Amino acid sequence: MVSSAVTMSAPFFLGQVIDTIYTSSSEDFSASLRSLCIMLSGVFLCGGAANAARVYLMQISGQQIVRNLRVFLFSSILRQEVGFFDKTRTGELINRLSADTALIGRSVTDNLSDGLRAIAQATAGVSMMFYVSPSLAAFVLLIVPPMAGLAVIYGRYLRSISKRTQDSLAEATQLAEERISNMRTVRAFGKELTEVAKYTEKANYVLHLAKQEAVLRAGFFGATGLSGNIIILSVLYKGGLLMASEHMTVGELSSFLMYAFWVGISIAGMSSFYSELMKGFGAGARLWELLDRKPEFPLNEGIVLRPEQLKGQLEFQNVSFAYPTRIDAPIFQDLSLSVPAGSVMAVVGPSGSGKSTLVSLLLRLYDPVAGVITIDGHDVRDLNPYWLRSHIGTVSQEPVLFSCSIAENIAYGAPDSGTVTVQEIHRAAQIANAYEFVRGFPKGFDTVVGEKGVLLSGGQKQRIAIARALLKVFLITPDYMHQKWYVLVKWANVVMYAFSPFSQNPKILLLDEATSALDAENEFLVQEALERLMDGRTVLIIAHRLSTIQNADAVAVLDQRRVVECGQHAQLLGNRQGLFRKLMEKQAFLQEGQKQALR
Ligand SMILES: Nc1ncnc2c1ncn2[C@@H]1O[C@H](COP(=O)(O)OP(=O)(O)OP(=O)(O)O)[C@@H](O)[C@H]1O
């Protein structure tokens, strides 16, 4: 306001200076001119300082708004249910997080400040024009209605183009993100040039939209520039006539002209403000959708069981399920399965029969369409999902590591990774048979594993993941505990862990046995680590190895959307017509001798 007030008072005072130059008598001329100029210099100094303050504040608050938008958006994205990520692509989300937030940040800060200033100046300019010469002002303002109509049409188009631009930019980012993160596959298939061509196509579409925007902007800015010049010309014409008829002094005409200039500049500022605002609205549409999206599952609400209440009995009762993205392709229909507390249940079945889906349902990554899944009699939908997941250890077939050090990856398994000691990490690595190979690296536990752990071998990744799961199982601390209790509980854990790491309360483990071609040594080491992990816990293991199936307390065979057979290994083998026996006969892991015996 200060900066605008100063700017807009300038033409009035400058008009006074001109009239002083024209009308003052020679003896007081220089004195009054000097005092007027000194006074004006002071006013201009204030205006300059106010303007600098405005720009600084806007820069700072702009960055703060962008930061807040990014943090809120990231937090909203991470709260969404897993099904959301099946539907939404990573590249798109990254684009929203980086490009869209920046665009909106710019449109509501720098732009808003410039825009408000332009509006204030245009209003003040128009008022001063009326003050200096009402008839000339009324004449000039005839131009406003057609310009306003043009601006509305322009704004509407610009908004839609901006939305399409941000969407296609998101598509291009999505493609780039996916190809770069799977570079090895692209290289192996020699698809670099094809991928570049695909990306170019997407980038070309963004360019095409940018051209459309350029045409639109050029037309609008050309029209506003033209109307500004026409205003000045008509002011000179009409003002010249008024001066000739002595209705206006030269100072007044000069002031009026300067106001007309300012109004012209402010209108240009307002059009640019309006353009940016419309672009911001266009980009914002998707961003608000994401920010406002309510996750389908709560993240941290529901029943929390006390440690002694958790026994680990798992039960699927008449469960029907289909993935939300493919609701018409049911994975389970009326599936029932019971895993007694403390037992090991091996799950087998043809590929695609839904073995991994069972694990996802237990982790409550998805909810069944019908039926219930219970843990110790509690429906998992009533349990606090955050608590639930923190009490279930998982090791998946393709363990995903983060691009940080091995130590940090292992510590990720603990509820509060900042408090994990080096000894705990080493111990977990020892039990997971990872210690020796990690120590063999020049940087040991500080070795960075690369994106998704690409710098490690399959077997090494798996053992690090087992160490991570171990830390989760041994260092579970109830999150409702107070900080001082936390220390005690942690110590108790460490002591139990040191003397007898396997004698804790039974917890639940969901394991997906590796099918990847580990060499015999690695496979043995991974297997050994898994067996240590399984001891004394309720385990649901997606089994691929004969020894795992043989050692399990029971085997469930999945097929045709349900559990077709369930029982002990020997008992199921005895059923000559059973699917389990057929699977066993087909599996490559059966030794020739065992196949003979089966026959
Ligand atoms: N996120 C998902 N969205 C939609 N469908 C999915 C999703 N994940 C898996 N599916 C489908 O669900 C079915 C069961 O998949 P699941 O991964 O549970 O099978 P599986 O028995 O573990 O297979 P495998 O032994 O090959 O790993 C498959 O037909 C698969 O295509």
Image (cartoon, rainbow, N blue to C red):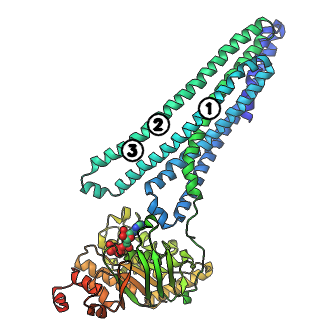
In percent of the image, x 44 and y 81: which residue is there? 334
Element type at mark 3? helix
Instruction: Identify the amino acid type marked 1.
Output: Ala
| N-terminal-most mark, 3 or 2 | 3
Reading the image, the residue beneath label 2 is 210
Q: Which residue is mark 1?
A: 151
Residue 284 horizontal side relative to residue 321, left or right: right
Q: Is residue 144 above or below residue 506?
A: above
Q: Earlier in the sequence, mark 1 or mark 3?
A: 1
Determine contact: label 1, label 3, CB under 8 Å: no
- Secondary structure at badge 2 equals helix
- Residue nearest the viewer, comparing 599 with 59: 599
Q: Would you name the residue on which mark 3 appears?
A: 202
Name the element at disc 1.
helix
* Quadrant into which the C terminus falls: bottom left
**Figure quadrant, ligand 1:** bottom left
- Disc 2 under 8 Å from ligand 1? The reply is no
Residue shown at 68% from the left, 27% from the top: 145
Q: Is residue 103 above or below residue 504?
A: above
Q: How far apart in space, not on screen, are marks 1 and 3 (Cα)?
A: 30 Å
Ligand 1 closer than 8 Å to label 3 CB? no
Q: Position of residue 207 (x, y in %)?
A: 42, 38
Gap between marks 2 and 1 measured at Cα:
19 Å
Question: What's the amino acid at mark 3?
Answer: Lys
> Which numbered disc flags the more N-terminal residue, 2 or 1?
1
